[in-house]
Image: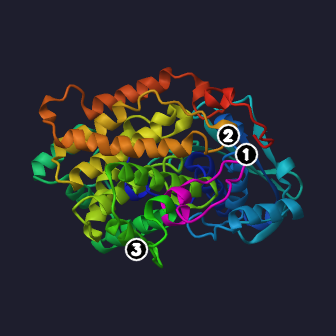
Amino acid sequence: MEAISVFDMFKIGVGPSSSHTLGPWRAALAFVEELRNQQPLDWVSRVEAHLYGSLALTGHGHGTDLAIVLGLSGTNPETIPVNEVTAMPERIKREQRLRLGGEQDIYFDPDHDMLFHYSKSLLFHANGMIFRAIGMGEELLLESTYYSTGGGFILREGDDGQSGRSMPPHPIVTADDLRRHCLAENAAIWELVLANELSWRSGAAVKEGLLRIWDVMLHCAWRGCHTTGELPGGLHVTRRAAGIMRGLLGEGNTYEDPAAWVESIRRSKHSFSDIVKWIGCFAMAVNEENASFGRVVTSPTNGAAGVIPAVLLYYVCFTDKKPDDEQIVRFLLTAGVIGSIFKQGATISAAMGGCQAEIGVSSAMAAAALTEALGGSVGQALMAAEIAMEHHLGLTCDPVGGLVQVPCIERNSMGAVKAITAANIAIDSDPTKAKVTLDEVVRTMWATAQDMNTKYKETSLGGLASTISINVPEC
């Protein structure tokens, strides 16, 4: 049993994929640190990166090659200027020089030193990679195998996967654990999760960290709603969120920043149809940014990064609550623990479980958080999470061209609407009469993932990816 923090479920990084961009980036950073701890970096002549399984099959489309280069260079995905995400790898490819760990120049030719093993997979996980450091005399200095296990989580082969944190006062692996602790403490879900977080960091740090997460989500939606043009990658997908936003808000509204933009949306007239359009607009805006190597928050993954911000913006803009910072923090605490239950009991990796592991999990997280935010009980919140996932079971991951664009962007808007619907159903229901528990749906999701044909697990070999005729050279 590992101790999972809400900050493990919500990681700030760049798009387009947590499993195929953020995870490999963090793995490359970890490899360089492992190397640095064993010998001086100036002993290294060159480095090789070998990508296997899903990482190889959709790596170019998901920016895995860029992520590896950026990680080996020692850059931080949370702070790197977004314009450098593509510019730095282009320079390295052109010059065939890489500054290893930000301190030692080595020869690096991505076409030669990064190998995509399309027909091979490593046994432990579909997202496997092997790094090799070669010395001046062509001797092998270090070889390490890493796995990107979903949501930006990584595991080095031979490690136990434990975070090293102390066990929190209320260990939570299953939904039943969460329910029992809440009943014993007479606590809401967010209160219990906060108590666990306080065993690792101060209350001020928890609040500051989660408000920063929200700020990144909000700015991402803002940028996506104000950026037009075509998404990169060769599919020629046109951004739509900005046009939808202009049609809904009209031309007469003026604002200078995201906060004023949100207030302008709150003040505007909106029918039921308009609200549904706004929800889709918010979700698509975030994932259009994600597809453009923009800064996003894994929620719990990059491919599903638009669901929770969209539902949060629905909560902020279209309910009578007018949430303050405390309510935003509570929402994210509740969402985070639901995500951790799926990670521990099933998977949040599309390469292991299809899109039910990404959009399905994010929808369940948002549904539970919204239910509690609107006054629902612990039982109703868990019921909402179950309902949301129940209606994503079996959802495949079939990105056209290996890009997180079709059907991924629209799919986030569907997940957001399902989350809100699930919350509304749960609030009007008696959870003691539910026929399916959240733990049962988690087990069912994992069983479904194991039964699912591999080609439907983020390989671009099945579904829409195999039936849509395109010409995307890098995929």
Choose the circle earlier in sequence order: 1 or 2.
Answer: 1
Specify the amino acid type for callout 1: His
Within the magenta stretch, is there residue 240?
yes
Name the foreground residue: 58 vs 277.
277
Find disc 1 in the rendering and name its residue: 60
Q: What residue would you read off at disc 2? A: 402
SS of the residue under disc 2: helix
Quick check: 433 left or right of 140? left
Which residue matches tag 3?
259
- Nearer the observer: mark 1 or 2; the answer is 2
Q: Secondary structure at mark 1?
A: loop
Q: Name the chief secondary structure element in magenta.
A: loop
> Which of pointers 3 and 2 lies earlier in the amino acid sequence?
3
Left or right, residue 405 beside residue 441 = right
The residue at 72%/70% (across/down) is 102
Q: How is the image coloured?
A: rainbow
Query: In the image shown, does 236 or 85 lie closer to the viewer?
Result: 236
Residues drawn in magenta: 222-245
- Mark 2: few/some/many CA within 10 Å (<14, 14-19, 20+): many
Amino acid type at mark 3: Ala
- Residue 394: percent from the left, percent from the top? 45, 27
